[in-house]
Amino acid sequence: DIPTEQWAQVVEKTGGPSVYKKIPVQKPGPDEVLINVKYSGVCHTDLHAMMGDWPLDTKMPFVGGHEGAGVVVAKGELVKDIELGDHAGIKWLNGSCLACSFCMQADEPLCPHALLSGYTVDGSFQEYAIAKAAHVAHIPKGVELDAVAPVLCAGITVYKGLKESGARPGQWVAIVGAGGGLGSMALQYARAMGLNTIAIDGGEEKAASCKNLGASAYVDFMTTKDLVAEVKAATPEGLGPHAVILLAVQEKPFQQATEYVRSRGTVICIGLPAKAYLKAPVFDTVVRMITIKGSYVGNRQDTQEALDFFARGVVNVPFKTVGLSELGSVFDMMKDGKIVGRYVVDTSK
Ligand code: 8ID
Ligand code: ZN
Ligand code: ZN
């Protein structure tokens, strides 16, 4: 039975806090499903949304969250390809028009009419959340819903970013922000894709975690005397990594990456620090033939591929579970850069 009221975390003004309170359960529209969210990962994007960090307005008030794993409990009359009881995931891309020239080419994250979970529509920090049926992630039964939740944004995003980098099996990739949520996933997807990784982050706890997740080397951005030299030294012949995946929530590493990436290499920008700019020397970019690209979540195919890796057991990322009511304390740890891996909230607590 679907209740009429539920617990949710609601941001009522920019800057927060997020308020744990009861709100009504919505009904799905004709092309939508209602998902009983069991677990939701907490992405740094949720913190950016609450703080108003980006030049894109949220709905207000809003329920954050976009890594929601749960069970389909209701569906609209047009929904044919998903059944009640199926396991499904709420991801960042809640819906798109499916008709524009981007959607036609499976670039639906670029759709001008995209709906964003936990940003322009209410997300997964509630017990019951709505998504467009065409866009929900199909989670195989038998996959643990708490462990899979972080795949729904972090996993999809880094898997797509690694593909966009063009790095091939046997090559070297630097993961910047490797100890965080996306970074931990990136180390595991990279290894599963046959890539060697250099992890860059700060502190001993993250060093140990990165090594556990398969990093060949760890460079501590907080203590190194020369980050560029250390990253290059960790690669064969000291020529630098073939690709750099930027996941940090600071501007400086975005300026540094072109200094250590290998000639002909690719820098993939994924992290979204507030008010940050890219800067690279034109001379080096030209004569070393460096590519700099952005990468933004993934499409429905990337979603299913990322979930396939997870279901095969080749992606294992550490996570800690707390109640949905404790979301505020997760945000506090995230602000201080203290989270190793991902926090997942249990919506029943
Ligand atoms: O589609 C996208 N492009 C997309 C999807 C999902 C998330 C983008 N994001 C963005 C988020 O909005 C956020 O800006 O990616 C960024 C990382 O999200 P996250 O992994 O959820 O954040 P985290 O768990 O806090 O990890 C960030 C890590 O960066 C490290 C921190 O220590 C932390 O482990 N870090 C920082 I801050 N500065 C660093 C530096 N200078 C650094 N690591 C290396 N060098
Ligand atoms: Zn996210
Ligand atoms: Zn579209």
Image: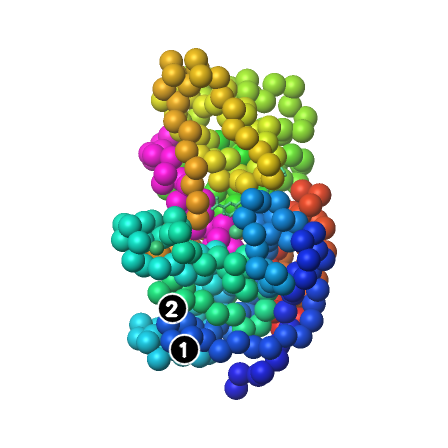
Residue 196 visible within the image: no
> Position of 134 compared to 130: left or right?
left
Q: Where is residue 251 in the image (x, y as percent from the top left)?
A: 59, 31
Identify the image quadrant of residue 329. Answer: bottom right
Q: Give the range drawn in magenta.
A: 149-173
Label ID, residue 75:
1
* Quadrant assignment for ligand 3: bottom left
The Cα–Cα distance between marks 2 and 1, rounded to whole angstroms, is: 8 Å
Q: Mark 2 points at which residue?
A: 133
Main secondary structure along the magenta-highlighted residues: helix
Is disc 1 surrounded by few (<14), some (14 to 19) or many (20+) residues within 10 Å?
A: many
C-beta proximity under 8 Å, tags 2 and 1? yes
Is residue 275 a member of the stretch shown in magenta? no
Q: Which amino acid does label 2 sit on?
A: Ala
Residue at 42% across, 56% down = 114
The residue shown at (69%, 45%) is: 335
Residue 219 lies, with reference to residue 214, above or below; the image says above
Can you say which quadrant of the picture contains the C terminus?
A: bottom right
Q: Which amino acid does label 1 sit on?
A: Lys
Tell me what residue is drawn at x 69 percent, y 71 percent: 21
Q: Nearer the viewer, residue 315 or 275?
A: 275
For the image shown, how many numbered marks are present on the structure?
Answer: 2
